[in-house]
């Protein structure tokens, strides 16, 4: 392996990091709202709303993300009504097509994570909150939501990592993120090993930082579940005496 070329490749690929992070962050932001909406529809919606939500999850979890990306990027423009609509200036751009496909896909997976987190909260706690005079909204915000977030965070952290890796598919529709720049370098230099090894290292570094951030947040949210230091307990007892 040519290490000077490898280091130069890392420097070149770093130019695609901002676009990769932008794709991931916008997709997550939109996907979270989709996930909450779909999970709410499946839990508390009417019969038809539940069926629509189930069909949405079935379609986007059951088909490859690459197929979804191609259908949105190449397929939407086939409809004249779309081309004549006010959305066409946005939907004709590969960046927004990538955002839309990633958000819809992660929203389907995230809805199952959110739904599982909400279902993990014991119903007895909700009934106790209502018995204490809390409104349904306050009981949800103070009792259900905090516990659901703690339960769903580890699984959603995995979904974030998968989404960061999925942004590499955006290179198929001409976006020059990390994988797009790597493919361009390979076409120019024919050095597959160095370029793709460097690209893998960049993705590994991004996901390492992401996993540490998720772990730090999980550690902060579950402080009450960790055993207390016996020495601190004894000092507190002595102070009370």
Image: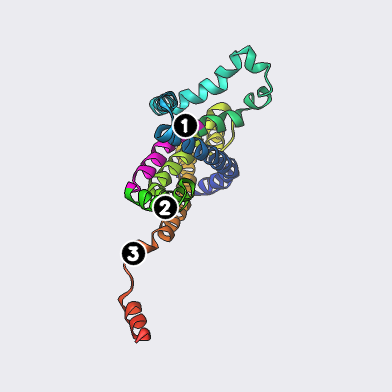
Q: How much space separates mark 2 and mark 1, taking CA atoms?
A: 29 Å
The residue at 39%/40% (across/down) is: 113
Q: To which quarter of the image does residue 21 belong?
A: top right
Task: Point out the frontmost of discs 3 and 1.
Answer: 3
In depth, the one of 22 and 82 nearer the eye is 82
Q: Earlier in the sequence, mark 2 or mark 3?
A: 2
Q: Circle 1 is placed at which residue position? A: 105
The answer to which image quadrant residue 78 occupies is top right
Q: Secondary structure at mark 2?
A: helix
The residue lying at 40 percent from left, 35 percent from top is: 43
* Residue 102 magenta-highlighted: no
Q: Is residue 42 left or right of residue 187?
A: left
- Tell me if residue 85 can be seen: yes
Reply yes or no: does residue 107 show up in magenta.
Answer: yes
Q: Position of residue 162 (x, y in %)?
A: 43, 40
Provide the residue designation for mark 3.
Answer: 226
**Mark 2 to mark 3 CA distance (whole Å):** 20 Å
Mark number for residue 197?
Answer: none
Q: Do the CB atoms of the residues marked 2 and 3 lie less than 8 Å apart?
A: no
Which is more foreground, mark 2 or mark 3? 2
Residue with the mark numbered 2: 143
Give the extent of the magenta segment: 104-123
Q: Quadrant of the C terminus?
A: bottom left
Q: Position of residue 48 (x, y in %)?
A: 43, 23
Observer-nearest of 91 and 139: 139
Camera-side residue: 163 or 79?
Answer: 79
């Amino acid at each position: 392996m040519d290490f000077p070329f490898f280091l130069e490749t890392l420097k070149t690929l770093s130019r695609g990091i901002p676009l990769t992070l932008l794709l991931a962050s916008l997709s997550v932001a939109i996907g979270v709202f989709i996930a909450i909406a779909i999970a709410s529809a499946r839990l508390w919606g009417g019969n038809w709303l539940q069926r629509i939500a189930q069909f949405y999850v079935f379609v986007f979890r059951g088909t490859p993300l690459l197929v979804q990306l191609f259908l949105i990027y190449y397929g939407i423009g086939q409809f004249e009504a779309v081309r004549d609509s006010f959305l066409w200036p946005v939907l004709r751009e590969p960046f927004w097509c990538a955002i839309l496909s990633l958000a819809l896909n992660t929203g389907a997976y995230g809805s199952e994570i959110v739904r599982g987190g909400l279902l993990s909260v014991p119903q007895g706690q909700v009934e106790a909150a209502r018995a204490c005079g809390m409104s349904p909204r306050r009981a949800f915000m103070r009792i259900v939501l905090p516990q659901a977030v703690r339960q769903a965070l580890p699984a959603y952290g995995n979904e974030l990592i998968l989404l960061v890796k999925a942004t590499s598919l955006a290179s198929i529709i001409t976006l020059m993120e990390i994988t797009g720049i790597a493919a361009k370098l390979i076409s120019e230099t024919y050095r597959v090993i160095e370029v793709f090894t460097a690209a893998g290292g960049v993705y590994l570094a991004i996901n390492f930082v992401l996993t540490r951030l998720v772990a730090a947040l999980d550690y902060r949210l579950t402080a009450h579940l960790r055993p207390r230091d016996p020495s601190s307990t004894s000092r507190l007892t002595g102070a009370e005496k």
